[in-house]
């Protein structure tokens, strides 16, 4: 009897969303013990978020409608940097166990960072609300390095490392074979996967090689000289980044001078981010004789972000245009000496970007969920403005005229709520990278953007983030029309 029960318990399956959630909690507590300042930052963000939700019932209501309210406190992203195509390939398989898939392609070379990247994350609304954990994952591009001798050495060092534990790999294989893991295997998996992201203060390379790698680019040293892709930051989501930035200063955590992304607005769009400087950490370098020599490395930092509505291709191109225009007008990379001027330029430029949800919606600049407002009276057939026949038809194929939708919104039958941006921004990411590398030698790499190579290494195509937002919107419209139909 007892035996039977045990068999049943151990046969229970662990769902990928639950594994992702547990993993993100385990990662957060590991990082808090590795970098205590991250814990302070979490406390500050939690305080500010509670204040925003208390003071602004409209924000709270919006987050309740979109289902984000419960995820805010667990919301975070991390970042890692990988050295080889094989590492990226296995990393993709590892994240798949947690229901995380590669979304988007980011080429950082034009901004002087020799990597290209993707973000691993959940892709549907429900899974995202259950656990929005995501990891910005970069692959080093040694093809952009022209020092052939150093390149060869780097390749040799990377070929010698194994960043995954043997148990992690066999659990990944088990998952791929069976399509799931049991409760016990899921627990094991979280523990084994975490090992890959741990910080190691003993390096497999000599101090001399480390220095040569650093001289080429700080990022190359950070990837090649270490045992594995230590998580280099974890980023909580705040509902008010300007207040957190002030709070950081007050707590003696100096943030970088510029908040990356769009300026402060009533209706946040995309993503605003700021980080605090990487910590200088003591490292033991392994000399060829086998003894260790002390030195320092700066890699790990803290970051906060505020997320806003996802933009359509039309909205995104307006964003890119206004951002580029602002940076061109400033003439140099924004930094602490020109921060005030840069914000002024940015604010002026973004006056051209509508700042109320209704206009963002009506002009097709952003993505929204459509939701049936249950307690509003459904328009009756005597309602002369509404063409209910056309509405009837739209139930079957989700096509609804802009005019009918506008009427439904105005009558309070349907509401629309912003779909939050789940991804990253290449210009911002480059700013985050650079603020943590004492490196401004190279302002851009000339090599071609190489999405094909990246996807070949990954073993799959990356998802197109814009198509995912369009799907989320379409699905909500479908559900909304379905509800209206059955409430007639
Ligand atoms: C990644 C930097 C990009 C973000 O939030 O844009 C990033 C890195 O430093 O490895 O995390
Ligand atoms: Ni980040």
Image: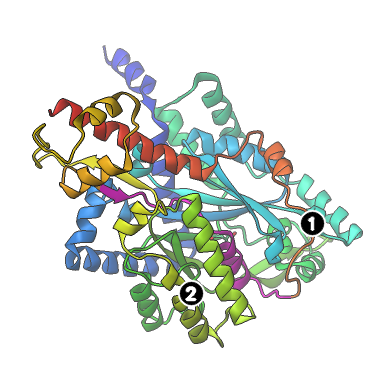
Q: Residues within 10 Å of mark 1 (few under 14, many from 20)?
A: few
Name the residue rendered at 44%, 53% in the picture. Answer: 311
Name the residue rendered at 20%, 60% in the picture. Answer: 58
Label 1 vs label 2, nearer the camera: 2
- Mark linked to residue 447: 1
Q: Where on the picture, by quarter, is residue 52?
A: bottom left
244 to the left or right of 223:
left
Q: Residues within 10 Å of mark 2 (few under 14, many from 20)?
A: some
Residue 138: where, in percent of width, then height?
Answer: 63, 52
405 or 119, nearer to the observer:
405
Q: Quadrant of ligand 1?
A: bottom right
- Please, what secondary structure does the residue beneath circle 1 have? loop
Residue 419: where, in percent of width, then height?
Answer: 36, 49
107 to the left or right of 159:
left
The magenta segment is 416-440
Query: Extreme front residue here?
Result: 384
- Mark linked to residue 404: none
Residue 205: where, in percent of width, then height?
Answer: 77, 59
- Mark linked to residue 349: 2
Q: Is residue 424 magenta?
A: yes
Q: CA gap, disc 1 to disc 2?
A: 31 Å
Name the residue rendered at 47%, 56% in the picture. Answer: 315
Q: Is residue 205 above or below residue 372?
A: below
- Quadrant placement of the N terminus: top left
């Amino acid at each position: 009897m007892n035996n039977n029960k045990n068999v049943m318990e151990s046969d229970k399956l662990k769902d990928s969303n639950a594994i992702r959630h547990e993993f993100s909690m385990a990662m957060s507590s590991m990082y808090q013990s590795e970098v205590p300042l991250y814990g302070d930052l979490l406390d500050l963000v939690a305080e500010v978020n509670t204040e925003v939700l208390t003071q602004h019932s409209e924000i709270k209501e919006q987050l309740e409608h979109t289902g984000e309210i419960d995820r805010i406190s667990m919301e975070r992203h991390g970042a890692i940097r990988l050295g080889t195509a094989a590492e990226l390939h296995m990393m993709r398989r590892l994240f798949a166990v947690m229901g995380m898939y590669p979304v988007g392609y980011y080429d950082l070379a034009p901004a002087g960072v020799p990597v290209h990247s993707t973000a691993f994350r959940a892709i549907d609304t429900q899974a995202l609300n259950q656990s929005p954990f995501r990891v910005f994952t970069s692959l080093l591009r040694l093809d952009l390095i022209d020092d052939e001798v150093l390149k060869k050495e780097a390749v040799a060092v990377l070929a010698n490392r194994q960043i995954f534990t043997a148990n992690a790999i066999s659990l990944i294989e088990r998952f791929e074979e069976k399509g799931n893991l049991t409760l016990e295997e899921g627990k094991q998996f979280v523990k084994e996967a975490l090992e890959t992201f741990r910080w190691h203060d003993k390096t497999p390379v000599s101090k001399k090689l480390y220095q040569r790698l650093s001289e080429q680019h700080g990022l190359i040293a950070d990837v090649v000289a270490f045992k594995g892709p230590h998580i280099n930051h974890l980023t909580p989501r705040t509902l008010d980044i300007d207040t957190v930035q002030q709070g950081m200063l007050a707590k003696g955590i100096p943030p970088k001078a510029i908040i990356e992304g769009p300026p402060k607005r009533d209706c946040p769009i995309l993503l605003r981010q700021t980080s605090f400087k990487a910590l200088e950490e003591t490292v033991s370098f392994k000399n060829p004789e086998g003894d260790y020599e002390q030195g320092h490395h700066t890699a790990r930092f803290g970051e906060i972000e505020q997320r806003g509505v996802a933009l359509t291709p039309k909205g995104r191109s307006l964003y890119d245009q206004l951002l580029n225009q602002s940076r061109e007008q400033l003439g140099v990379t924004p930094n602490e000496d020109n921060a005030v001027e840069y914000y002024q330029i940015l604010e002026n430029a973004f006056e051209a970007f509508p700042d109320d949800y209704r206009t963002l919606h009506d002009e097709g600049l952003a993505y929204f969920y459509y939701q049936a407002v249950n307690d509003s009276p459904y328009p009756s057939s005597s309602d002369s403005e509404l063409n209910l026949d056309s509405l009837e038809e739209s139930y079957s194929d989700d096509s609804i005229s802009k005019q009918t939708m506008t009427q439904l919104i105005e009558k309070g039958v349907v509401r629309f709520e912003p779909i939050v941006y789940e991804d990253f921004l290449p210009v911002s990411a480059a700013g985050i990278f650079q603020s943590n590398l004492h490196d401004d030698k190279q302002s851009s790499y000339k090599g071609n953007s190489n999405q094909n190579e990246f996807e070949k290494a990954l073993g799959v195509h990356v998802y197109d983030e814009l198509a995912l937002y369009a799907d989320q919107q379409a699905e909500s419209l479908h559900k909304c029309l379905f509800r209206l139909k059955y409430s007639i």
